[in-house]
Structures are given as structure tokens and as C-alpha cells.
Image: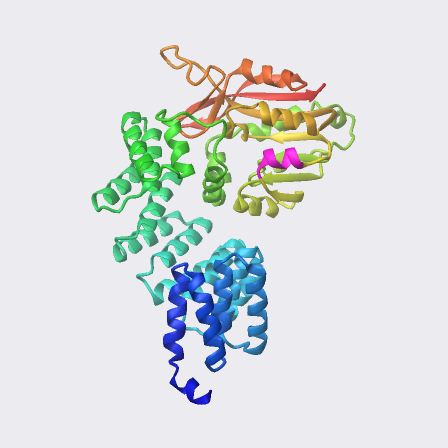
């Protein structure tokens, strides 16, 4: 056996196994790895590759066990630490992942991937300034790596420096002009800044360079639609649909342009993608638009019998809580404890920073309502129902989860005739060109009564401003009969 071991090129063998894993061919990699472990000298590379096979196969517990044992035996192996950091990131242990990534970076200070991984994890932990430092070092070490540039730009956005983020992306595009991810990130940043002309220019340049995918065409359509160039937006959405017929973001925005029939609600992946992307600038953006819904909720709850009598009203369920603006608006009233539910982990991180929620759940609100058993005296839905067309299902679940005399306070954007008197959609609800649903006043009240809810307050209100024009809405307080 020693003679056989001497003839084995371990480096070539592990390289071959690694390539099979990277290609997703774990069925071929696993037996080769088992054979290598039997005939080659022991090496930390074998448990590392074993863990990567298990991770590829979704067997995260097995990967964790393999890495824990290997790191206990070889604590100074940077690759093992980095792999466990990636695994812990997948399982949601961000603190543990960051600790492993930091250790990997200390063990191998010349590895830009360890610096980039630590930077991404620090960003997820809300430490944007530290993330910029790590990702900046990764970019300096490997300026042509698109993912490092994209990560650095995300950290700069989180720190509130959108100009620096755009400069980082521009430099990255210059160094790696074939990167669709960098082109998309730059265009998305322009959309977030509401610089729609710049977004269109960036998208057009990507198209002329032959670097355009479904997501980019979707962003271009969104920007054109926001500029009122609806015919051009429709063309962009049509291209997006050709390239990404199964992409939930693309299909939803194409439906908003009127080219395909809208679904009964926005796709979950679409909503999560939108709000994960907007989390860092969400509050400032809404404030700049004159967002009024939290204030309307505050005024309505001042009229609640419990609040008027000085009693505590709660617990309160905040559906689609986002960054926690509703809880912040109500923090001077005797209301709570608050439980927040949202699809976006990054929005929930912002809500957690308010320290106003006893519990935060990353979940679909319909699923959460349908699977729960408790009753609530107060349920809030501020600017959430605009991602639902048909309101019957969610109103039914809300009615079931309210206790006797419980209040449901919500807002919707109003479906109104256009300048030619045409009412779009089915007359009850329609998908707006920017991806949100609008609802008719009679439809909202009709569904509420059908589900056993009494209308206490029904007000036409300006919810916010967009392009200097008020967004008409309906503010409703419903009570379980």
C-alpha cells in the first residue's frame, strides 16, 4: 500500500473531484472521493470535498458533521473554515459564519475570496462599514472579479453612498464588460434612485454590447414605464418574456404591462426580490414620497375603544411589516406587543433594529394566517394588499384570526377610470403598470362584508406621491362582526 500511495498524484485527484462537484456531478464525485480516501494519504482536502458534495446534495447536517470533525483535527486550515462559513450562511447562522470567515481570512491573508465572503456576511449582519473594508480589500486583490465589485457596491449602498456604489459598478463593468450581473446591478441602482433616464441608458448600452438578459429587459421596461413611455416599455417587457418566460419577476412585470393575464397576487419570489433590494433605502424613499399610511393608522387607532379608555391594545399582528414603520408610528400609544411578518429577511433585519417587535417571522402572510391558531385583537396591513389582486382569500384568513370585535386596519390603492373613462382589469381589481394591484372601493367593502367584517372606517386618501402626483387610495378599518 505505501508503494501505491507514492504513485498517486493527490493534487490531480482532488482537482478532478472538485471539478465534478462544481459541475454538479456529485454522483460521479462521491465514489471517486471514497476511493481516494482509501488509497491516498490522509488530507484535509478530503473532508473539505466531502462536505462540498454533501452541500451540493442538500445534506447539510452531514456536511456540518464532516467539517466540525475536520476543523477540530486541523484548526489552522483556511479552506475548511471558509467552507464551514459558507455552510453556516446557508443554514442562517450568520454570526458563526462570520466568525469562520474571519478565521479563514486570518489564516490566509492573501485569499480575496475569504475577504469577500466575510464582507458579504458582515453586510448581512448590518455592519456595512466593516463590509466595505473587507470587500474593498477583495476588489484590490482581484479587481477583475465581478462578484467582489457587486458586493462592494451593495455595501456602499447600505452605508448610504449610492454615488460610490455606482462608481464601483462602473469600474467593474469597465474591467469585466461581459458581466451581466454588474450591468443589472448598475441599472437596478439607477431605478432605486428613481433616475429612470440613466437606467434606460445603462440598459441600452448593455443591449448594444450584447450583454442583456431577462432581468435587464424587465428593469428597462420598469424605467420606461415610470417615464410614461408605455409603448417602449411594452417592447422591453416582451423581450424579457422571451428570455425568461419562467422568471417570476419578469412574468409579473410583463403582466403589469398588459401583455399577459395577471395572477391573483404578485409572486412570492418577486416580492422578496423587490424588498430585499429596497431594504436599505426603503424608509428614506417612502419619506421622500410623502408616505402617509402609518400616520393614518395612528389617527384611526386613537379612536379605538381600548386606546381611548387607557387600556392596552394587543398583541398586534403587523402583516408585511417591512422595516417597522407602522410600529414606529404607534410607539407612543399603549399598543403591543407587536409581531411582524414579512417575506424579506433584509426588511426584517431593519424592523429588528427598531426594538419594537417581540417576534419577527420570515413568512408568506397568507400561509402564516392559514396555519396559525391564535386570535388577534388588532391586525395591520399597511401597503401590503397592493401585492394582492383577489382579496377574498386574505380577508377570509384575517376574519378567522381576529377575535370578537377585533380590528383589521389596512390600505389599498384605488382602481379609478382612466382619462377616457375606461376601468381596467375586471372592474374589481387590476394590476398597475408598476407591478402593484389597485382595487375598487365597492369591491373592498363587498369582500369585507362577505367575510364577516363590518366597515368602521372607509376613507379615500392620498397614500403618497409618485412623479409629483398623488397616489389615490382607500384607507379601511374593519371589525369582526
367 magenta-colored: yes
Residue 113 position, x and y percent, is 41, 65
Q: Is residue 171 above or below residue 481?
A: below
Front-most of 66 and 412?
66
Q: At 67% across and 25% down in the image, what residue appears?
A: 399
Which stretch did the figure color magenta? 364-371
Task: Residue 315 in the image: state x and y as whole percent.
Answer: 72, 35
Q: Quadrant of the C terminus?
A: top right
- Vertical comparison of 141 with 39: above or below: above
The answer to whether residue 190 is left or right of residue 463 is left
Total residue callouts: 0
Residue 273 spot, x, y in % from top left: 46, 42
User: Can the viewer see residue 12?
Assistant: yes
Is residue 105 among what the camera can see? no
Q: Position of residue 122 (x, y in %)?
A: 51, 58
Q: On the rendered structure, is 213 left or right of 18?
A: left
| Viewer-closest of 379 and 357 | 379
Amino acid at each position: 500500500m505505501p508503494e501505491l500511495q507514492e504513485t498517486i498524484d493527490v493534487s490531480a485527484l482532488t482537482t478532478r473531484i472538485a471539478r465534478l462537484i462544481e459541475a454538479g456531478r456529485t454522483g460521479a464525485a462521491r465514489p471517486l472521493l471514497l476511493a481516494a480516501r482509501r488509497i491516498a494519504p490522509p488530507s484535509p482536502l478530503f473532508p473539505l470535498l466531502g462536505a462540498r458534495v454533501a452541500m451540493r446534495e442538500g445534506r447539510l447536517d452531514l456536511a456540518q458533521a464532516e467539517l466540525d470533525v475536520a476543523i477540530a483535527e486541523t484548526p489552522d486550515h483556511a479552506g475548511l473554515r471558509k467552507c464551514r462559513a459558507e455552510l453556516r450562511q446557508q443554514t442562517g447562522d450568520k454570526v458563526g459564519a462570520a466568525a469562520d470567515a474571519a478565521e479563514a481570512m486570518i489564516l490566509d491573508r492573501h485569499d480575496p475570496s475569504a475577504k469577500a465572503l466575510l464582507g458579504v456576511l458582515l453586510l448581512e449582519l448590518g455592519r456595512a462599514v466593516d463590509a466595505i473594508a473587507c470587500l474593498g480589500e477583495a476588489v484590490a486583490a482581484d479587481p477583475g472579479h465581478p462578484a467582489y465589485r457587486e458586493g462592494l457596491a451593495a455595501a456602499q449602498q447600505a452605508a448610504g453612498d449610492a454615488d460610490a456604489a455606482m462608481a464601483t459598478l462602473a469600474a467593474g463593468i469597465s474591467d469585466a464588460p461581459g458581466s451581466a450581473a454588474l450591468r443589472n446591478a448598475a441599472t437596478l441602482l439607477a431605478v432605486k434612485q428613481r433616475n429612470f433616464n440613466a437606467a434606460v441608458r445603462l440598459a441600452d448600452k448593455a443591449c448594444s454590447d450584447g450583454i442583456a438578459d431577462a432581468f435587464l429587459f424587465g428593469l428597462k421596461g420598469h424605467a420606461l414605464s415610470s417615464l410614461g413611455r408605455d409603448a417602449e416599455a411594452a417592447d422591453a417587457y416582451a423581450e424579457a418574456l422571451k428570455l425568461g418566460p419562467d422568471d417570476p419577476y419578469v412574468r409579473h412585470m410583463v403582466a403589469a404591462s398588459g401583455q399577459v393575464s395577471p395572477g391573483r397576487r404578485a409572486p412570492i419570489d418577486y416580492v422578496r426580490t423587490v424588498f430585499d433590494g429596497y431594504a436599505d433605502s426603503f424608509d428614506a424613499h417612502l419619506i421622500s414620497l410623502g408616505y402617509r399610511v402609518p400616520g393614518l393608522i395612528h389617527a384611526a387607532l386613537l379612536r379605538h375603544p381600548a386606546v381611548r379608555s387607557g387600556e392596552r391594545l394587543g398583541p398586534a399582528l403587523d402583516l408585511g411589516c417591512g422595516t417597522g414603520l407602522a410600529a414606529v408610528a404607534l410607539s407612543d400609544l399603549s399598543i403591543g406587543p407587536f409581531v411582524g411578518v414579512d417575506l424579506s429577511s433584509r426588511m426584517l433585519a431593519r424592523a429588528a433594529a427598531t426594538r419594537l417587535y417581540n417576534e419577527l417571522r420570515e413568512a408568506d402572510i397568507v400561509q402564516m394566517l392559514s396555519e396559525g391558531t391564535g386570535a388577534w385583537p388588532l391586525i395591520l396591513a399597511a401597503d401590503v394588499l397592493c401585492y394582492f389582486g383577489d382579496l377574498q382569500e386574505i380577508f377570509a384568513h384575517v376574519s378567522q384570526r381576529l377575535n370578537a370585535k377585533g380590528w383589521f386596519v389596512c390600505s389599498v390603492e384605488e382602481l379609478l377610470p382612466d382619462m377616457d373613462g375606461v376601468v381596467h382589469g375586471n372592474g374589481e381589481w387590476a394590476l398597475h403598470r408598476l407591478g402593484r394591484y389597485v382595487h375598487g372601493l365597492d369591491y373592498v367593502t363587498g369582500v369585507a362584508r362577505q367575510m364577516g367584517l363590518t366597515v368602521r372606517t372607509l376613507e379615500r386618501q392620498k397614500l403618497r406621491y409618485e412623479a409629483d402626483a398623488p397616489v389615490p387610495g382607500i384607507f379601511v378599518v374593519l371589525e369582526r362582526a
